Amino acid sequence: MSFLYPQFFYGLLALAIPVIIHLFDFRRTRKVYFSNTRLLHQVKETTRSFYQLKHLLILIARLLFIFFLVLAFTQPFIRPDEDPALASLHVGLYIDNSKSMMNRIAEDESGLSVAKELGEQITQLYPTDAQFKILTNNKHSVAYYKDRAESIQFLRDISVGSTQQTMGSLLAQLTNQTLTTTPGEVYLISDFQRSTFGDMRISSDSTTRLHLVPIKFLDNANVAVDTLFIQNPFEIDKEKLSLKIVLKNFGDEQKESLPVKVFLNNNQVLVTTVTIEPRSNASFEFNLGFDLPEISTGRVVLDDYPVSFDNNFYFTINLGEQIRVLSISEDRSGDYLSSVYGSRDLFDFQSEVVTNLNYATLQDAGLIVVNGLNHLDKNLLNQLEKAWTSGITILIVPGIKPDIESFNSLMPGITMSDNSEMTPLAIPDFRRPFFENMVENQQKSITMPTAKDVWQWGADRNSLLKFLDGRPFLSEIRPHLFVMASPLLDSMSDFQTHALFVPVMYKIASRQGFVNQRLYNRLNDHEIKIHVDSISSRDIVRLKNKTTEIIPDQRIINQEVALSVPGDELGAGVYDVMINGFRRTQLALNDDLHESDLSVYNFSDLVEMFGDRPNVEVIDAVNASDVIDQLKTKYEGISLWRYFVALSLLFLLVEVLLIRFL
């Protein structure tokens, strides 16, 4: 047994006081006057020995009361086992401040508030000269050692973030030996979310003692928006656009009659209820309405209590951007193309004869279709290569007798085909991203078009459409460069009259337009690309809403801006994309979907994974006070002062009872 304040042992000198009182009885005698000796018979006789025993017992009770009271003030404790890590003055501490930590562990207490409280109390366990390296999920935070006062203030200032870090990344930062001393102990206070914590492998030969403190929530059920998209993006009449919303139930129980609201341009356009089976999806769709503005913003609102961080899902719809399509042919024979791209809402279609072509129009196009040319002169070839290099999509449809050599520099590997028969095309793999939302009923027995190829480019397993014998019919042989094997002539192919023709041509054109635009993005997206006309390297792109304005890292590639969005600095919502003070478009950002899956590694899971690691300890506790009690027992030993206070009060009660009843 050891004593935290041994100087209080001087208080044992107070034991002399009851001894002195016992040896020298200072009680005053009282005179009792009585007139009748019969009263003497009413006095109980007391022997001298009984009188001495009573006073001796009272003396012992008083001595024990003082003795145990003094011991309580000395703070006695049983020392823990000696361990070098326990004496470390450098401690690592990770506080999980991801969105999932907003889940409740009690009616009025979140996981993050408990984690911050635990972190603050852990700093109190160590000597005043201890140093603490504190880390959160914020990617731009630098973990360096702080003293106790700085650490407590840092912990109190932690707020919820929008990013996550894996176990490996956290330990690499906390145990980095390059610039600072390796901590002897590291605490990870987290919900240990399965979907975000990554690889849970930990080195077994580390000299750092690792403590895992899992936060236990009341309930891990949650529903969130999985995705949403335009159900019929290839519909020419955009008054008929239909929005499909997919919800996902991450819980193990059915979610019945979940209220869902949809807002479009701050107006509520839909109220419905959805029932979702456990660990499954449910979807619904509705028409977006008439006369939508060029840029519309929307929000899906779920009434899913108590997990509320992902109850709002934001999206934008940009209908104002037309795709410029330029067709280059021998004699304006582009009837099929004009039928496809003739929609004034979606496309700005222009057909030019190659002999009268103004090369300046190539750089303004979003899609260039080289339709039925047998020969490319050198000037046109150079302009096409320049346009393709600048990011413009090009589709090359051959003539009946193409001059292979004039196309080779743009499309190396093209050779003439010796096929002379009309051959059916194989059914495409509709699961590929190119065919996403293209065909509503993906029948296995669909009738495919036939074609006769005039050139070929060898085996292409990534071809979008191919013949039954595997020869490619339509391929993206280079990024944004599409090649078709047959001319769009009735004598060479019936693809141009097949049901697949319009959606395929729309999809090719959609590389820079509405059909392929993203209605939303996630805060964990590493890079977001936005198509903006007339932008130069000198222009600065800003993201702005009512509360935040930032200049993200950006790269301008032709007519696209690649933005590196700092998810830990932004929250979910709709942001204006500002260029030179003018709003050019809007960007909808939402939380990482993995955060919505609240499945965690619980205490038993962590024990199973790390139970054989001598440097890893998993702490099981219901609340913060239980965790601190366990840690105090380990680091401070078993405190005994409460027991001595109880003994002191017990002997005080014994003294009172002896005086009263004996």
Image (spheres, rainbow, N blue to C red):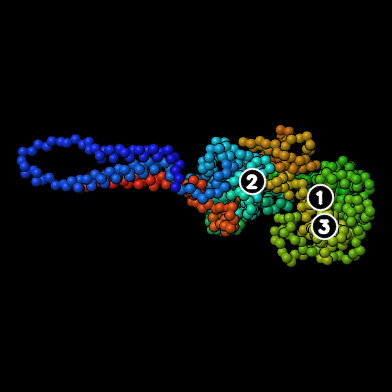
Mark 1 secondary-structure assignment:
loop
Q: Is residue 182 above or below residue 399?
A: above
Do tag 2 and tag 3 residues touch (Cβ < 8 Å)? no
Residue sitting farthest toward the top: 581
SS for tag 2?
loop
User: Going by the image, does 58 lie left or right of 491?
Assistant: left
> How far across and down, in percent of the image, does residue 656 sit?
26, 44
Which is more foreground, mark 1 or mark 3?
1
Q: What amino acid type should be assigned to the residue bearing mark 3?
A: Leu
Q: Is residue 179 left or right of residue 93?
A: right
**At 77% across and 58% down in the image, what residue appears?**
500
Residue at image location 61% in from the left, 44% down from the top? 183
Using the image, tell me which numbered label, if any, was put on residue 474.
3
Work out which residue is located at the far left of the displayed protein and give it.
Answer: 36
Question: Disc 2 marks which amino acid?
Answer: Thr
Q: Secondary structure at mark 3?
A: strand
The answer for how far apart the CA atoms under marks 2 and 3 are is: 53 Å
Residue type for callout 1: His
Residues at discs 1 and 3 in contact (Cβ within 8 Å) = no
Q: Which residue is mark 2?
A: 175
Q: Is residue 435 left or right of residue 660?
A: right
Could you say where residue 220 lies in the image, as x and y percent from the top left? 54, 53
Circle 2 packing at 10 Å, graded few (<14), some (14-19), many (20+), is many
* x, y percent for residue 640: 42, 47
Q: Residue at 45%, 41% (x, y): give it.
A: 4
- Whole-angstrom CA distance, mark 2 to mark 1, is 45 Å
Q: Position of residue 442 (x, y in %)?
A: 71, 62
The residue where tag 1 is placed is 480
